[in-house]
Image (cartoon, rainbow, N blue to C red):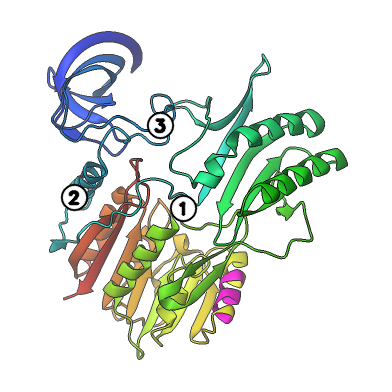
Amino acid sequence: MNNTIESEHIADVFSIDYEGRGVAKIKGKTVFIHGALPTERVSLVIEKERKHFSEARVIKVLQPSVERVFPKCCHFDTCGGCVLQHATLKAQVAYKQRILEEQLEKIGGVKPDEFLPPIYGLEWGYRNRVRFSVSENEQGVFSLGFKEKYSHSVVDIKGCDILPASVSDILPELKFVLQKLVKINGKVIYVECFFGERVTVLNVCMQNILNKSAQELLKRFSDGLNQAGSRLWQIWVKHNKDQAYPVDTDSQLSLDYTLPEYDVTMPYLPGDFTQVNMQMNALMVNRALSLIQAEKEDRIADLFCGLGNFTIPMAKSGAQIIGMEGADYLVQRASKNAFLNQCSNVEFKQADLFKTDGKTIADWGRFDKMLLDPPRNGAYAVVKSLHAPYLPKRIVYVSCNPATLARDAGVLVGKGYCFKSAGVMNMFAQTAHVEAIALFELY
């Protein structure tokens, strides 16, 4: 059942869901309300009726929450990115903490001994990595921005406050250049931006191989950006699934980020997975390492290790660290990062962690401790396959999806682990995305 209707109601909002929608009841049926906050009374219109719930949007806030603020962004009503701009930062973090608690109890049937103090981070200008959508309609109207809420349409943005100002400010000029690029070289699929310590890279993904005129256009754009400000810029180009390459091959600068507390520098390439919020990443690494308590005599597994974001700082303890990752090219790059940071007590291995079984665990041998940082679908195969005598005495689990964290937490508790602590880290301010961390110890 998926009927689109419009009927007006008044409701009291008692909670918020993982998509940032207010939750209310109308005649016993759950209603998810776009634009509503907990404790508010709102006038709403139901847009879709489904079998077990309804979807609605706010027409008017009759009794506002004390946490309601006016959204900073002029695109808030249409853009699908920052769905919580109408709430204070403190309230956003509290909502995310509540979502984590509810998911742990509902899905995993578990509760930690304590909830860690939340980590807040920057409210604006924090996003160091972003992908812009590009579209051109039948009338030739060109759009550069982000996907509309619950739609594939692109919201044409003039700027974005969660980006560094130097990136947000060039968006009108970038759009103008891309319009020219489409005319001389064909479709632009998307544009990525990577904001490194020393250089900002724009990575343009094209449907067609770059021709000479297009290359000259992008080179002029890059030169103009570098002449206009103190920030250094590079333009890279990617053709479908081919490896990205710089338009200006003379540039010697590369992307990197630093973790100064551990004297770590991490080079990366456009397209690599890195955390979108480097300030919060440093705080997250600090918390993870304080929880895992690596000691020199430990043998520690870092699973889903990527470029070594946790592995290499953890190696500074002197412990023997084994990092595992599914993509072989990431294993090679992580190994280079370890060499660059003079970490000889680190080894990286390729492993399909989603196919982990009991034999895999035995083949790895005994680990004293384990750090998990899986993608959104979690680490179920790993935690399900853990068995004596190969159970690490301590597991730190970093998660970008509280639902799969809750599922996996239930499995670990069932294997005899004590769920010591959990907490949220506001990696994605203004959005509904929840980043969390949890600690498990054997009884």
Q: Main secondary structure of the magenta part?
A: helix
Q: Quadrant of residue 362?
A: bottom left
Q: Is residue 440 magenta?
A: no
The dot on residue 130 is none
150 shown above or below 432 = above
Residue type highlighted by circle 1:
Val
* Mark 3 neighbour density, 10 Å: few (under 14) some (14–19) many (20 or more): some
Residue type highlighted by circle 3:
Cys
Q: Quadrant of residue 268?
A: bottom right
Q: Bounds of the magenta span? A: 333-339
Secondary element under disc 3, as helix, strand or loop, is loop
Residue type highlighted by circle 2:
Glu
Reading the image, the residue beneath label 1 is: 276
Reading the image, the residue beneath label 3 is: 73
Foreground tag (3 vs 2) = 3
In which quadrant of the rendered image does the C terminus lie? bottom left
